[in-house]
Image (cartoon, helix red, strand yellow):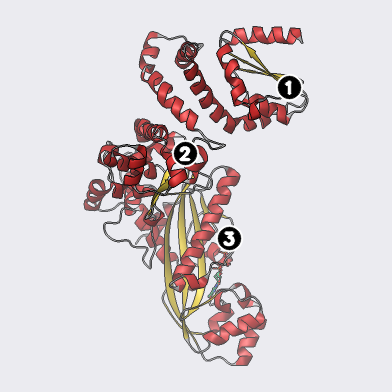
Amino acid sequence: MVLCPVIGKLQHKRVVLASASPRRQEILSNAGLRFEVVPSRFKEKLHKASFATPYAYAVETAKQKALEVAGRMHQKDLRAPDVVIGADTIVAVGAMILEKPVDKQDAYRMLSRLNGKEHSVFTGVAIVHCCSKDISGPGRTLRLTLSSWAPRAHPTDGRLDTEVSEFYEETTVKFSELSEELLWEYINSGEPMDKAGGYGIQALGGMLVEYVHGDFLNVVGFPLNHFCKELARLYYPPRPEDLRRVRHDSIPAVDTFENLSDSEAGGSDPGQSAKGGRGGEQADGDRSQAPRALDAALNGADSRPPFPTGLLELMDGFKASKVLFTACKLRLFDVLKDQGPLQAADVARKLSTCAGRTEQLLGVCAALGLLEKTRRGYGNTEVATLHLVSDGEHSLQGLAEYNDAHVWGVFTRLGLAVREGADQTRGVLGAMEEERLSQNRELTLQFMRAKHSLSKLTAHHVATAFDLSRFASACDLGGCTGILARELAQEYPRLQVTVFDLPEVTELSGGFQRGGRQTERIRFVPVRTQRVGHYLQAKQSVLRRN
Ligand SMILES: Cc1cn([C@H]2C[C@H](O)[C@@H](COP(=O)(O)OP(=O)(O)OP(=O)(O)O)O2)c(=O)[nH]c1=O
């Protein structure tokens, strides 16, 4: 194996080592890796007895360390690093796990246990690949076509996707028969305190050791050799025959929805995330190999152009949108909120829909991160509960409904609008909306629900983006249900806010006010048109009257 190119695969990525261990930092920088150090704040307090083996504990701890850092950086920077590496080293005597001693007595107990015997040193390693995504952005859309690969979504923030590759390495170490005196002398040197098992093989502790079987660096805190093999597995192209297999077996064709069966759609099932094991190897047909293999194959390991992921997402994004709209329209998320988790057949019964197609829809929703599939059936993910259930405080159901019923149709006419030069000041959408709004009260309400649900998410940010405290009045042109006005009034106690909108909109806006009432500092003024000039005239007259 050629090491440099393997490490080089991380060269243009933002790599973070989620560890305070100076040994790990040294091992990785000696190997030529460039990385930032962000020690993890994950408390190493997993319940040891709940793990079948000591190494499972080390792997899980390593993973939690890395995920904590990835999540924290993502929240802080609004952008996660590309790769976060976490590691955890433990000493195991049989099933007993020894971590860092808490004091000298503890170190003595540990070293006495190791005295004259063989023990195992395990280091669990997690390589977390991060991807910051917006659930509503086009970035999500490829999930439709790559559903069987979808990495695990973290619904807590709804936007950070991670794919975890984990493995462990075991090294056997044998201690000589050591006298009490020597043990205490060693303990008093202070060396044991920040090291698993209470010794450091790389320094004074080396004198305690009779032999080592396996990777020495693994004992010191990082199995570099295994790490490089793992990188090679992740980043190097598979053989052409493997690639052919990947293409045939794992990527649903673009017309995924037609072909996707339930079992293929489990991409959001955590059970499908990459599993480690000693080699980090996976069963031959394991699909979780596919993204990496294909990614590696398509992104630079040969002379072919980079895989046009973003472009394909644009090509297929409309399908994902339609899946979301359809699920909303059927009130799928409402049903699952009240009665889920449910099996596909039960969902079909409750929605009075075709069982087969419903099952496909559920599968795709799961692949898109909108639903979770467990043995008990389908349930809403956190993002669906928050934003897609119709009566939720942060529901975007109205927006989905409106986009489906109207915007979708308008956009099918975009080519025509561009060719024929539709009114550029109002825009295609504006023109149609205005025309329709004046015709139909239900349509107006639908439009208002859509704007209302979106504004509920954005209004606070808009209201607080600038310090407006020196102003006494503000107006919101096309302010619809007055959500922004309310935020402004709340944020700035002396601000008088005027909301201008079409008469049919201002007439219905009362129904959207909390408790049916609006605050006294907010006024709705009907204007006959949505043209900015007319708004401004109306504004002037309102100001003059004041
Ligand atoms: C057995 C042994 C362990 N160790 C060290 C490696 C690890 O740094 C430490 C085990 O503790 P860890 O919890 O694995 O790591 P850490 O606390 O040092 O750093 P972080 O949690 O931030 O990643 O013991 C040696 O340096 N030499 C040895 O011979």
Q: Position of residue 303 (x, y in %)?
A: 30, 42
The residue singled out by tag 1 in the image is: 521
Q: Quadrant of the image for the N terminus?
A: bottom left
Label 3 amino acid?
A: Phe
State whether label 3 is within 8 Å of ligand 1. Answer: yes
The residue singled out by tag 2 in the image is: 135
- Between tags 1 and 3, which lies in front? 1
Q: How far separated are the C-alphas under marks 2 and 1?
A: 36 Å
Q: How far separated are the C-alphas under marks 1 and 3?
A: 48 Å
* Helix, strand or loop under label 3: loop
Residue nearest the viewer, comparing 399 with 300: 399
Question: Could you tell which of marks 3 and 2 lies nearer the N-terminus?
Answer: 3
Q: Are marks 2 and 1 in contact (CB under 8 Å)?
A: no
Label 2 amino acid?
A: Ile
* Helix, strand or loop under label 1: loop
Q: Position of residue 380 (x, y in %)?
A: 45, 45
